[in-house]
Image (cartoon, rainbow, N blue to C red):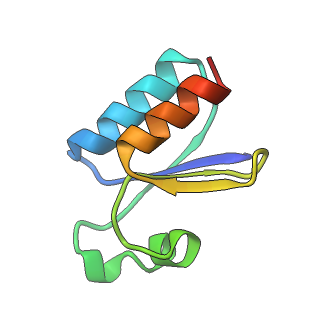
Amino acid sequence: MSRTLYQLDGCPYCEKAADRLDELDVEYETIWVDALHSDRDEVKRVSGQRGVPVLVDEEYGVTMAESDRILEFAEQTYA
């Protein structure tokens, strides 16, 4: 899969990003992360920080955090 969305269960920002990707019919893999920031080593490895959501789009060579940035990217790229 060329797109991955790192999410935390129950995170409203993650849900916002995932919902918009779903509305745009974008295929992506979800990786659910641990609630403890200190256990989010994979997120840190791919994005340089431990917060979620994080979108990795290999097709466009993009890795980004923060739901508003992800939504803006999704609108400009996938809509």
Instruction: Please determine whether, in this image, residue 40 is positioned above or below residue 21.
Output: below
Q: Residue at x 65, y 24 (%)?
A: 78
- Residue 69 in which image quadrant: top left
- Residue 35 in which image quadrant: bottom left
- Residue 15 in which image quadrant: top left
30 or 37: which is nearer to us?
37
64 or 32: which is nearer to us?
64
Q: Residue at x 52, y 55 (%)?
A: 64
Expressed as whole percent of the image width and height from the top left, the position of residue 14 reads 33, 43
Expressed as whole percent of the image width and height from the top left, the position of residue 7 reads 38, 51
Which quadrant is the C terminus positioned in?
Answer: top right
Instruction: Please determine whether, in this image, residue 24 is positioned above or below residue 18.
Output: above
Q: Residue at x 22, y 40 (%)?
A: 12
Expressed as whole percent of the image width and height from the top left, the position of residue 50 reads 37, 72
Expressed as whole percent of the image width and height from the top left, the position of residue 45 reads 54, 78
Q: Residue at x 74, y 54 (%)?
A: 61
Q: Is residue 36 left or right of residue 68?
A: left
Total count of labels: 0
